[in-house]
Amino acid sequence: MPAAPVSRLLLLALGAMFLQQTFAALGRNLPSVIAPAILDDLVLDPALAGVYVGLASAASLVFQLGCGGFIIRWGAMRMSQLALVMLAIGLFAASTGNLWLFAFSAIIGGGGAAVSTPSSSHLLGRYAPPRQAPLVFSIKQTAVPAGLLVAGLLGPLLTAWYGWRTALDVAGIGCLLFAFALQPLRAGFDSDRVPSRGFRISDLWASAILVTTDRDLRNLAFACFAFNGLQSVVLAYYVIYLVALGHSLSTAGLVFSIAMMVAVPARILWGWLGSYHVPPRLVMGGLALGMAASSLLLGVSGAGWPLVMLGAGGVFMALSALSWHGVLLAETARLAPEGQRGTATGGVLSFGQIGALALPLSYALMLSLTGVHALGFLVCGLPALVVGIALLRGGRRPGELS
């Protein structure tokens, strides 16, 4: 597509990656959204939801660390297609109801979702002007709450009408169909790939080396640990928490979807602020403190609270813990060495996956030991508080925490 205007290519790439990440978010998070029905049908301990998320996050960590070389060789669009195929396989495996296949589903689905973001960052980084990058990346990342919105609205409905197994299968079919729909764009958008690039074992830690040896990228990685960890806790347990307080799955799914609707304009707003008015470091610092405050609100909530207050906690979480991505990813792409945007993004997000592994498992452990949900929100909000204070200290460069 060399003769086409860059602006048109940017819009086409943005639209394709928006839809791809919508399906990726749907495929990755649908099992968590309809988890109460799955746990009830299979008579499982609710703490296992955290184990599922933890397995997916562990797989995401490995895939994000090693995907940079594959993006260079096969192209960002091909890897985006592969991610959707992996998610579909994971959803089909989970729909069998076999616990071992649930574990397989978490691993392959987590890996598929993990590849999506570095791939889209690599592609959009080629066409997005640096000044508008936070806004462009934020618009693309609104696909995540869009996918969660679809999961929250359709997941419980399909589960009520046809069962949770069918809900997972329908989502898997959708991922497969869109993977094929992206094929006409592959040749043009993967024109920068290097077919001679072979896979090396060192690729597995190339992303980590790049991030840990660069101060700005390293500090963005620390922020990603806190942000993604708390986000994973919310996605894994918010609906389960509402159902545990006595609300129906359909009601909890509706409240969850409302929160996701709020996250869509919020991501665009924070991206617009980070592009034109406020340094990205300050935007991320404010969001971090918002995450800590939202965690406190849910942490002190309980059975006596009205649904509107519990919903407010979810909305505040959506405004902060589910809305930071565009600003942080744009900063990562800006700070990455030329030609290594996917590698740098994978490295920063791998720290986020460590958070997504550690915090949900911590929540699951506390829930198993105490039987209290709210305590988990309190504890898992502490890293965001530390990051927020560090980011808002004066005299620091964007992304600097130490």
Image (tube, helix red, strand yellow):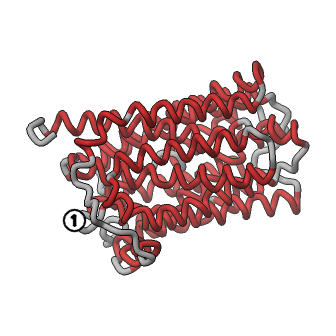
Residue shown at the point (44%, 74%) measured from the top left? 208
Residue 218 visible at all: no
Say which quadrant the C terminus sits in: bottom left
Label 1: element kind? loop
Give the answer, above or below, for where 64 lies relative to 126. Answer: below
Q: Nearer the viewer, residue 84 or 152?
A: 84
Say which quadrant the N terminus sits in: top left
Residue 378 visible at all: yes
Position of 190 with respect to 361 (left or right) is left
x and y percent of residue 59 in the render? 59, 61
Residue shown at the point (48%, 36%) measured from the top left? 22
* Furthest-right residue in this view: 43
x and y percent of residue 57 in the render? 61, 59
* Furthest-top residue in this view: 161
Residue shown at the point (41%, 72%) measured from the top left? 203
Q: Nearer the viewer, residue 85 or 236?
A: 85
Graded by Cα atoms within 10 Å as few (under 14), some (14 to 19) or many (20 or more), the crowding at tag 1 reads: few
- Residue designated by label 1: 338
* Furthest-front residue in this view: 196
Give the answer, above or below, for where 96 lies relative to 326. Answer: above
* Furthest-left residue in this view: 3
Q: Nearer the viewer, residue 121 or 259?
A: 121
x and y percent of residue 18 in the render? 39, 37
Please name the amino acid that badge 1 sits on: Glu
Position of 334 with respect to 387 (left or right) is left
Q: Nearer the viewer, residue 191 or 356?
A: 191
Quadrant housing residue 375:
bottom right
Give the answer, above or below, for where 121 lies relative to 399. Answer: above
Residue shown at the point (50%, 57%) measured from the top left? 288
> How many tags in the picture?
1
